[in-house]
Image (spheres, rainbow, N blue to C red):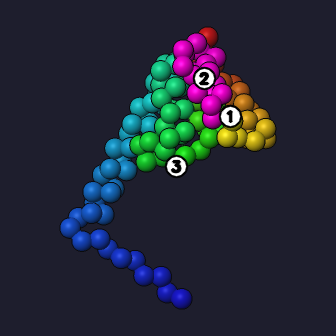
Amino acid sequence: MDQVRIKLVGGTDTQAETKRAEYDAVVAQCLAAAEHGSHDALFDLGVVFSTGDHGVAVDLVEAHKWFNLAAVGGHEDAAGCRADIAEDMTAREVAEAQRRAREWLRATPARRVA
C-alpha cells in the first residue's frame, strides 16, 4: 500500500517545524547549562521529560535521571519530584535511570555535581 503524505495548508508545516526548533533550542540550552553544573537546569530537564513539555515525549526514566542528578546537587525540590515519578515506575526502570545518571556523571569530569 502506498503511503500518502498530506501537506497542511496555510504554512502549518513550517509553523510546526519552527515550534519544534524552538523546543529543541530550549532543551539544548538546559543541557548546556546542566553540563556546566546548573542544578536548576538539571531539575528543568526532569520537568521536561516528566511532563512532555517543550515537545519532548514523556520519558520517566530520563526524568528520574535528571531529578536524581539535581537532587544529588542539592536542588531543593528534585528529590520530591524523583520520588513522585518513581511511584509510576518499575524497579527495573528506576535502576536504569540510576545507571544513566552514573553514566552521565562519568562522561565528563566537569559534570560532577556537589
Mark 2: few/some/many CA within 10 Å (<14, 14-19, 20+): few
Q: Residue 43 appears at what percent x and percent y?
A: 52, 25
Tell me which amino acid carries mark 3: Ala
Residue 73 on the magenta segment: yes
Disc ID at residue 80? 2
- x 42%, y 82%: residue: 4
Asked whether residue 51 appears in the rendered view, the answer is yes
- Is tag 2's residue or tag 1's residue first in the polypeptide sequence? 2
Tell me which amino acid carries mark 2: Gly
Residue 74 on the magenta segment: yes
The residue closer to the viewer here, 80 or 27, is 80
Q: Residue 113 appears at what percent x and percent y?
A: 60, 15
The residue closer to the viewer here, 110 or 55, is 55
- x 54%, y 16%: residue: 75
Residue under label 3, please give it.
Answer: 57
Q: Which residues are magenta?
A: 68-85
CA distance separating discs 3 and 2: 22 Å
